Image: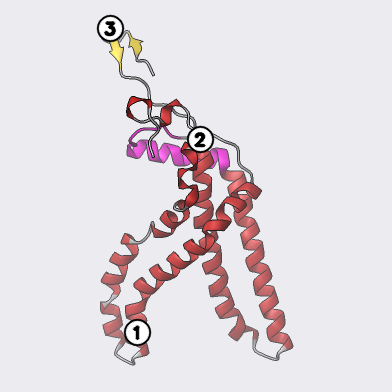
Amino acid sequence: MDGHWTHWGGGWLPPRAPRPGVISLRPLTPGDILGGACAALARYGVPLVGAMLLGQLAALLLLAATALAALALHVRPVDALVPASALATLLTCALASALTGAVLRPAVLGRPATARTLLRAARPRFGAVLGTQLLVLGAVAGPGAAVLAAGLPPLLAAATLPAALGLGVLCALAPTVAACEGPARSAPCAARPAWCAGPGGARSA
């Protein structure tokens, strides 16, 4: 890519970074990241929200089936709905993280996406994202829960809160990383245009 001429100093500027999608393909500044996030929401917000609403609908159907089963088995609905609600929340959070990773690929390349294609792209990574969320939850809440389960004073459980907060911050992006990893992570450079070429025109791995 050639440089371009500017009249602001009368010389050639370095070549502009290509931008096929919502961000430029170069090291990003905080402004680039925020601008890219807003642009992605503006361009892909409708299919992303549609896919998430389908996940919420599936969670509501799970809760409804749990309530009906509890009534049929003469069990208090509250006793069945509390764990079912926790499970539904965990599943919908995992779906949201998987969809976030799925929407990044078309957003970076400027390709169209629908709710159906996003769900199809998120499905292979859903298990990995769910497992990562369980690991993060265990690391964050495990020490305090173990203290309470052992019958020790609650103050000891409160003493684990700083460590839990630190682990939560460190592992906050782990589900998103799990969503973006996998065989599809090299897909943007599969149909290689010129801007994906490495030094000397060779395609980078």
The x, y position of residue 119, in whole percent, is 61, 53
Please tell me which of labels 3 and 1 falls first in the chain. 3
How many angstroms separate mark 2 from mark 1 (CA)? 46 Å
- Left or right: residue 49 versus residue 179 is right
Please tell me which of labels 3 and 2 falls first in the chain. 3
Q: Which mark is residue 146?
A: 1
The quarter of the image holding the C terminus is top left
Q: Secondary structure at mark 3?
A: loop
Type of amino acid at the residue the image marks with label 3: Gly
How many angstroms separate mark 3 from mark 2 (CA)? 33 Å
Q: How is the image coloured?
A: secondary structure
Please tell me which of labels 2 and 1 falls first in the chain. 2
Residue hosting label 3: 10
Quadrant in the picture for residue 138: bottom left
Most common SS among magenta residues: helix
Quadrant in the picture for residue 168: bottom left
Front of the two marks 3 and 2: 2
57 w.r.t. 39: above or below: below
The quarter of the image holding the N terminus is top left
Type of amino acid at the residue the image marks with label 2: Leu
Q: Which residues are magenta?
A: 23-44
| Residue positioned 53% across, 60% down in the render | 126
Circle 3 Cα neighbour tier, 10 Å, few/some/many (<14 / 14–19 / ≥20): few
Type of amino acid at the residue the image marks with label 1: Ala
184 w.r.t. 161: above or below: above
Residue hosting label 2: 109
- Left or right: residue 140 versus residue 124 is left
User: Which is more toward the observer, 151 or 99?
Assistant: 99
Circle 2 Cα neighbour tier, 10 Å, few/some/many (<14 / 14–19 / ≥20): some
Please identify the residue farthest to the right as the structure is shown. Answer: 72
